[in-house]
Image: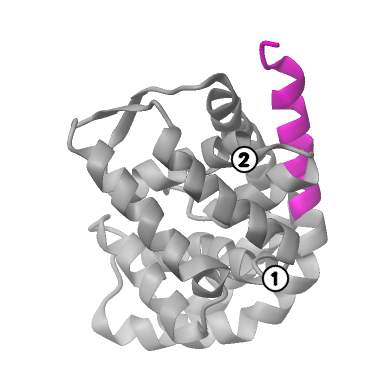
Amino acid sequence: MLDPMNFFGHVYVARCVGAGDGVALGAMLPDLASMLGARVVDVGPADVRAGVAVHHASDASFHRAPAFGALQRAGIDALLRRGVRRGPARGAAHVGVELLLDAVLAADPGASALYARALAAAADCATRWQPADAAARFGALCARLAAGGADEVRAGVDVLAARVDRALARRPRLALAAGERDAVRAWLAAARAAVGAAAPALVAAGVRGARTALAAAPR
């Protein structure tokens, strides 16, 4: 299964359930770890740990949502018609829908503010990493994301296409060939409106998972 990419979407869901900065940071943490190619060994404090649980529960609910399945299937079909091989088409449709959703949700000022505060909270996050040098890289990544802010998430199609390409390049069977990148870019441009229309249903699925996780979190 592909690593999830929609870290801003997790912040948006955290805001929907009234979570604070630490929970929002934890909700992004597994995605940020994937971006670093690192593993979180121990997470602290407790609100960040709760956020990690929120991440996994909301992600599972999100990926089971009929709206996500429909968007992914439509993306695969569109990419196959454009000449993309099946493996890369499946990967690009999965990652592309998530990145497009993040771009839509990043227009929300309240979620953008929580995103900034959560990234700032990383400086006080007592998290142990493997390898150990990932701690410094985590701090640098959070600083870079904070500098770009929500504007970086609300990227144009060219930037989103490059992000899909980089995400798939780590998986040899999913990596895009040179001739497939233009097809992915064209699909992203065409799919943006459909993802925007489905955003409320996708967010609702994530919120259901997040509420379940928070209800089960130690108090």
Horizontally, residue 121 falls left or right of residue 204, namely: left
Identify the secondary structure beneath mark 2.
helix
* Residue 57 percent coordinates (x, y): 64, 32
Q: Say which amino acid is labelled 1.
A: Val
Q: Is residue 96 visible?
A: no
13 or 99, which is in the foreground?
A: 13
Residue hosting label 1? 195
Is 204 one of the magenta-colored residues?
yes
* Residue 138 percent coordinates (x, y): 32, 45
Q: Say which amino acid is labelled 2.
A: Asp
| Residue 21 badge | 2
31 or 11, which is in the foreground?
A: 11
Which corner quadrant of the image does residue 205 belong to?
A: top right
Residue 1 vertical placement versus 141 (above, below):
above
Q: Dot 1, crowdedness within 10 Å: few (<14), some or many (≥20)?
A: many
- Measure the C-alpha gap from mark 2 to mark 1: 27 Å
Which residue sits at x=28%, y=65%?
175
Is 87 one of the magenta-colored residues?
no
Q: Which residues are magenta?
A: 203-219
Residue 170 vertical placement versus 166 (above, below):
above
Residue 120 vertical placement versus 165 (above, below):
above
Horizontally, residue 91 falls left or right of residue 48, namely: left
Which corner quadrant of the image does residue 48 belong to?
A: top right
